[in-house]
Amino acid sequence: MDRYEEMRRNNGEAPKEIDRDRFWYLLEVLPPAKWTRRGSSESFMVIECETANLYTWCARIGERYYEMIAPNDCNHFDILNLIAMHLPEEATP
């Protein structure tokens, strides 16, 4: 199955840990949308659509960085919750 078809069927892709350089590259390549900072976390959406209503989202929790594909109607807390649901307990705030 095509990656984009699978993303549409699953309403995105699960978060994966990335390095700081990838996070900053995505933050600086295009103007970020929905950029939010709360305490030791921040998240933003890359403004270029992947498919349908799905976009690349990035998040930082402490000194750990994540990337995922999620709907454009998510917010900072939705993104943190998706990370918490998909990654080991030690990775969540």
Image: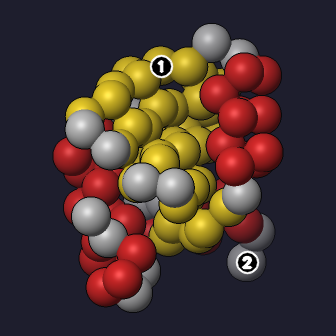
Q: Residue at x 62, y 12 (%)?
A: 31
Q: Is residue 36 left or right of residue 38?
A: right
Q: Residue at x 76, y 47 (%)?
A: 22
Residue 34 quadrant? top left
Image position of 6 with respect to 51: above or below: below
Q: Which residue is mark 1?
A: 33
Q: Residues within 10 Å of mark 2 (few under 14, many from 20)?
A: few
Residue 9 visible in the shown view: no
Residue 62, percent from left and from top: 42, 54
Residue 92, percent from left and from top: 32, 70
Give the colour scheme shown.
Answer: secondary structure
Image position of 13 with respect to 34: above or below: below
Q: Residue at x 40, y 54 (%)?
A: 61
Q: Residue at x 47, y 32 (%)?
A: 44
Query: Which one is in front, 29 or 12?
Result: 29
Q: Is residue 15 left or right of residue 30?
A: left
Query: Which one is in front, 82 or 24?
Result: 24
Screen quadrant of the N terminus: bottom right
Q: Specify the label residue 1 is tagged with.
A: 2
Residue 86, percent from left and from top: 39, 79
Query: Which one is in front, 60 or 57?
Result: 60
Query: Which one is in front, 34 or 39?
Result: 39
Q: Residues within 10 Å of mark 1 (few under 14, many from 20)?
A: some
- Mark 1, secondary structure of its residue: strand
Q: Could you tell me how far apart the alpha carbons at marks 1 and 2 are, in whole angstroms?
A: 30 Å
- Mark 2, secondary structure of its residue: loop
Residue 29 quadrant? top right
Screen quadrant of the C terminus: bottom left
Q: Residue furthest bottom?
A: 88
The amino acid type found where label 1 is placed reads: Ala
Residue 83 visible in the shown view: yes
- Front position among marks 1 and 2: 1
